[in-house]
Image (spheres, helix red, strand yellow):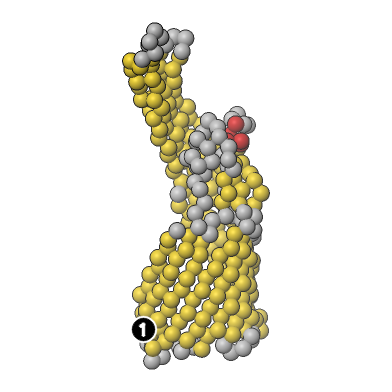
Amino acid sequence: DDTLWVGVSVAWKVIRRLSLGLSVIASYRSAIYQEQGLAVMRFFRRKDGSEYNRLGLGEMTSAELKHIGLMGVLGAVVTVTDHFKIGVAFRSPGIGLYGKADFNIFGTGYDQKKGIFTIEEENLEGIKFNHTEPLKGTLGLAYVVPQVWGVALDFAIYGPVSEYPVFEDDDYPQLEETVRIKKKLAWQLNVGGEYYILGRGPVRVGFFTNRSSDDPIERCGPLGNCADGIFLAAPVDMYGFSGSVGYEMDRVALNLGASYSFG
């Protein structure tokens, strides 16, 4: 499940201590989900009830998802003093331009009247796929003494998104009830600091969060087992650390950095 964001930005220094910025971002999500299972069928003798046979019946559901969306970001930075800055940014909710899902469902059926097994396969193509990006607001604070030391803090809030169906299709209305999701209010925190050794070698460390806003709805249906099935994984809150070391010259800056996420 991959998402690519591509954007363009424009910045304008309105006055000495105020700068504005505007970004337009296009997002492209591409995903392939697959779930395989084994249904066990047991056979018993009518007279004594003993088991005389057991069969494992394979089943598989796969889905290919594609989505294109659009977002806008408006931001401002205020230089309060020569060292202290405040930044704010607002990101619009995502606008879905295109969303499509193709399903392939394969399994083994059993006709009780005839006592035979049949291989069943169904392809659902062109199902509408919904993906949302919530409203986001960010506040950032920074205090920097250039080429000496600095600290920064960003706090972001993602707005909630009411419950909605992930898939929609007039020919398969059960899809709308099978896989539903909503996004709850979530917050993120980023804290970082830097220190320059002899004014040339910056050492930077940071801590960040990546808290999930997804809140799967507990429903079961023909595609996927329940909310914890093929499409709706349990939400995961992630945390991480980052750091880098560098060396700066008059016209060249070299940095080596890494980040580690866990959760």
Q: Is 258 on the left or on the right of 181, as rendered?
A: left
Q: Give the quarter of the figure containing the C terminus.
A: bottom left
Q: Amino acid at mark 1?
A: Tyr
Most distant residue in the top direction: 47
Q: Is residue 13 in view?
A: no
The foreground one among 196 and 96 is: 196
The foreground one among 207 and 15 is: 207
Most distant residue in the left direction: 52
Q: Position of residue 67 (x, y in %)?
A: 53, 48
Residue 134, by quadrant, is: bottom right
Question: Circle 1 is placed at which residue position?
Answer: 247
The foreground one among 44 and 82 is: 44
Q: Is residue 152 above or below residue 123?
A: below
The foreground one among 15 and 38 is: 38
Q: Position of residue 253 (x, y in %)?
A: 38, 82
Q: Is 261 on the left or on the right of 135, as rendered?
A: left
Q: Position of residue 166 (x, y in %)?
A: 58, 42
Q: Tell me which residue sits at (55%, 34%) in the image.
A: 220
Q: Is residue 35 above or below residue 28?
A: above
Q: Tell me which residue sits at (37%, 79%) in the image.
A: 245
Q: Assess disc 1: are there few (<14), some (14-19) or many (≥20) residues with their C-alpha within 10 Å of its C-alpha.
A: some
Q: Position of residue 196 (x, y in %)?
A: 42, 87
Q: Is 113 on the left or on the right of 249, as rendered?
A: right
Q: Tell me which residue sits at (47%, 27%) in the image.
A: 122
Q: How many marks?
A: 1
Q: What is the secondary structure assignment of the residue under circle 1?
A: strand
Most distant residue in the bottom direction: 198
Residue 136, by quadrant, is: bottom right
Q: Is residue 52 in view?
A: yes
Q: Tell me which residue sits at (49%, 39%) in the image.
A: 229
Q: Is residue 175 above or below residue 131?
A: above
